[in-house]
Image (cartoon, helix red, strand yellow):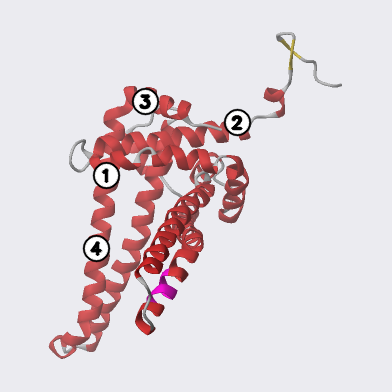
Amino acid sequence: MTFAAAKIDAQRVLMRTRRRAVAVSVLSLLLKGVFIVAFCVCVYSLTALPDYRQDVGNLYLYILFAALFTLGLVFSVLFYAWAGASRRRWFYKNAGAQQTVGAYFAKYTFRSFFKSVYLFWLRKLLTLGSFLGYLAPFLLGGAALLYLLRTSEISVPLLVLSLGFLGVLLVLGAFFGFVSIQKYTFVDGLLADTPNCGVIEALSKSRRIARSTGFALARMKLRFALWMVLSVLIVPLVYVMPYYCQSVGCAAKRVLDKKHLTPDTQMPIVFLRLAKSPV
């Protein structure tokens, strides 16, 4: 499967909703930046608070400050995940119908909010673990080479050969690790289409759907890598990011719409007319 059509779909969608897509991208980046700063401030405050124990004097006031900074830490983590999940959901829904900027702040129930946050961080942990698993040969080989360099002498040809082999392991591990994490691409679309779907169920369905699309999704995303790097110098990131996010959203929409076809829509075509369904 290829996703060239998904990029064409994204271009067509952005012709109608480019300003809104840019606004959502900038808004998401700003909110995530605010929550990162808030997280860092809370962590610093909690670590520095014991040094001001004598200055605070009142024990209850000290506990109040500690509780406030702890709550700030928790809420910054929760809403950072919400900002990222809401952006993915917006671009996925925008692939099917034009969304307003306000749709980024679509109402969440208490259950759906924590489900999206839980899925966001669980997905991060799973992708990190999967990626590191593919990089394990490179990491182990690098550790072994470093140990040999510290404990014994290695000839220059053997060192060059070892570094070249490690380079190959790094490239292969990074590529196949990137392919492996594409199996979680469809979880946001599944939750958007079926809000009652559980987190584990969404992850399981996404893995099954992505069995035949991992390499195609990885190739499509890697084509944006150079654009992302050059966007800092040439093209503003806010114009590259909407195209990337919308392409991913359109790709997920295409795959999920195909997977969710009803039996009536999958009836075979015989001589340019639908075959009769069995009685």
Q: Quadrant of residue 38?
A: bottom left
The residue type indicated by label 4 comes to Ala
Q: Residue at x 31, y 34 (%)?
A: 21
The residue identified by callout 4 is 38
Q: Is residue 24 visible?
A: no
The residue that mark 1 highlights is 229
Q: CA distance from mark 4 to mark 1?
A: 27 Å
Marks 1 and 3 sit apart, C-alpha to C-alpha, by: 21 Å
Q: Position of residue 20 (x, y in %)?
A: 29, 32
Q: Nearer the viewer, mark 1 or mark 3?
A: 1
Q: Residues within 10 Å of mark 3 (few under 14, many from 20)?
A: some
Among the two numbered marks 4 and 1 on one chain, the one whose residue lies closer to the N terminus: 4
The three-letter code of the residue at mark 1 reads Val
Residue neighbourhood size for the residue with mark 2, other residues' Cα within 10 Å, grouped as few (<14), some (14–19), many (≥20) = few
Indicate left or right for 67 with 124 as reference.
left
Q: Which residue is mark 3?
A: 11
Magenta residues, as a range? 142-146
User: Is residue 254 or residue 80 the one in the foreground?
Assistant: 254
Q: Earlier in the sequence, mark 1 or mark 2?
A: 1
First along the sequence among labels 2 and 3:
3
Q: Compared to 38, does 227 lie above or below?
A: above
Q: Amino acid at mark 2?
A: Lys
The 10 Å Cα crowd at callout 4, few under 14, some 14 to 19, many 20 or more, is some
Q: Secondary structure at mark 4?
A: helix
Q: Which residue is mark 2?
A: 258
Q: Nearer the viewer, residue 96 or 233?
A: 233
